[in-house]
Image (tube, grey):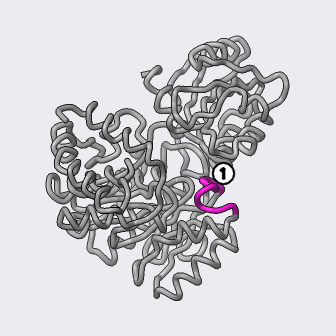
Amino acid sequence: MKTVQEVQEWLQSLLKFGVKPGLERIEWLLERTGRPDRRLKLVHVAGTNGKGSVITYMRSVLEKAGYEVGTFTSPYIDVFNERIAVNNRPIDDDSLVQIANFVQPLVEECAEEGLGNPTEFEVLTLIAFIYFAEVVYPDIVLVETGLGGRLDSTNCIIPVLTVITNIGHDHMGILGNSIEEITREKAGIMKNGIRLVTAVKQPEAKQIINTIAKEKKINVYALGEQFSVKDVKQGAKETTFSYTSMFRSFENMAIQMKGTHQVENATVALMALDLLKVYFSLLIDEEHVYAGLKNAFWPGRFEQVKEDPVVILDGAHNEEGIQALVNTLQAQYSNKKIYTVFTALADKDIKKMIEPLEKISEQMFLTTFDFPRAASLETLKELTSADTKTYPSYQNAITEAEKQAKENDGIVVIAGSLYFISEIRNLYK
């Protein structure tokens, strides 16, 4: 392989092996490459929603404090390389190609050993750890789970700190149909003695986490208990709030990412940063916290990409994400008519995503896009009201939505899938 395009094509060829939960293949690959993960200071982040935002807040503050911060996240929004980055600088093409060529024979050997073919995500996880441990040497690496936690390929690591943002209904075909089942999968990243920060709210989910924590002697830092937030004020440009933990307090903090759910994500990040400061001697001062939070930006999360009419992209892709989007729209644009362009992946609970959007939308525009797991127009149409319009071309759907919004003093909201938002964002760029 000589180009990133060829690397992508090779990785995408592994998609045919699907999602195969289990750690046998990634453990084998890491052992064969000298356990690069063991040479890194890692923070492991799981949860249904908010993982990327928590990592963004943490990275931004740590950057302001002068640290080199590696991140492993998914999916990508702008370019494939951004899934592996240091201080928001994506892995360079040469390094990606070189490491991919190094691991390709091992991937083939793994399959021949009887462990099965490694998946795309497993190989990308391996590439990330090799890059961080042998090329760029960041001070700390923030690792986002791909799916669930217990059997996710990132769960091979031994982190210094664990985060579970929240629990919601997503990937139920793999993780389970109840909050309890999903919680057990997410809580699978909890390791003996490793501190946990969480914003999980459901009593049944909290009980499971606390039971596991007791068994594994884990100190839990929970939102509303060991740390809290108050005085939340949503403005047109920023949201302000105050934060208190057992270690310190901050008044009148500001974030530019909109929605009260982003305040929750920011406070989870702050609690995690407090623990890194107190127990791992990271020098994170007050000015770093204020500047880092205010500077933090995560594309595709309630992101305005056009002014006239206002067009907002949001990667909400499950029931809880859509509800957070609806709440933010009602807080920010209660006086505007909303024209929603929507599509989703076929394996989601689409009906529960569409219903809240229909209630606040003047008009829904259903569409689809070229992606293996994208829902068909027929599937989407069956789940919506009779007057909802369908568009095989998402460009036509967006054009019509913008036209209606401009004529009726409204706004356009495009949502339903992060993969879709990634494609749409390039149009506006």
Part of the protein shown in magenta: 169-177
Up/down of 341 relative to 34, above or below: above
Query: For mark 1, does the 10 Å Cα neighbourhood hold few (<14), some (14 to 19), or many (20 or more) residues?
Result: some
In the image, taking residue 82 as reference, residue 407 lies left or right, namely: right
Work out whether residue 163 or residue 371 is closer to the camera in this orientation and state it: 371
Q: Which residue is mark 1?
A: 320
Estimate the x, y position of residue 336 in percent, counting from the top left. Answer: 72, 27
Estimate the x, y position of residue 31 in percent, counting from the top left. Answer: 23, 68
Q: Quadrant of residue 337?
A: top right
Estimate the x, y position of residue 198 in percent, counting from the top left. Answer: 53, 68
In the image, taking residue 224 as reference, residue 62 lies left or right, namely: left
Q: Amino acid at mark 1?
A: Glu
- The stretch drawn in magenta includes residue 171: yes
Work out whether residue 14 or residue 131 is closer to the camera in this orientation and state it: 14
- The stretch drawn in magenta includes residue 114: no
> Taking the image as drawn, is residue 66 in sight?
no
Question: In which quadrant of the rendered image does the N terminus lie?
Answer: top left
Up/down of 154 relative to 7, above or below: below
In the image, taking residue 297 as reference, residue 37 lies left or right, namely: left
Q: Residue at x 32, y 56 (%)?
A: 111
Number of numbered tags placed on the structure image: 1
Question: In which quadrant of the rendered image does the C terminus lie?
Answer: top left
> Taking the image as drawn, is residue 45 in sight?
yes
Up/down of 377 relative to 189, above or below: above
Q: Quadrant of residue 241?
A: bottom right
Estimate the x, y position of residue 324 in percent, counting from the top left. Answer: 65, 47
Q: Secondary structure at mark 1?
A: helix
Q: Quadrant of residue 334?
A: top right
In the image, taking residue 163 as reference, residue 116 lies left or right, namely: left
Up/down of 163 relative to 19, above or below: below
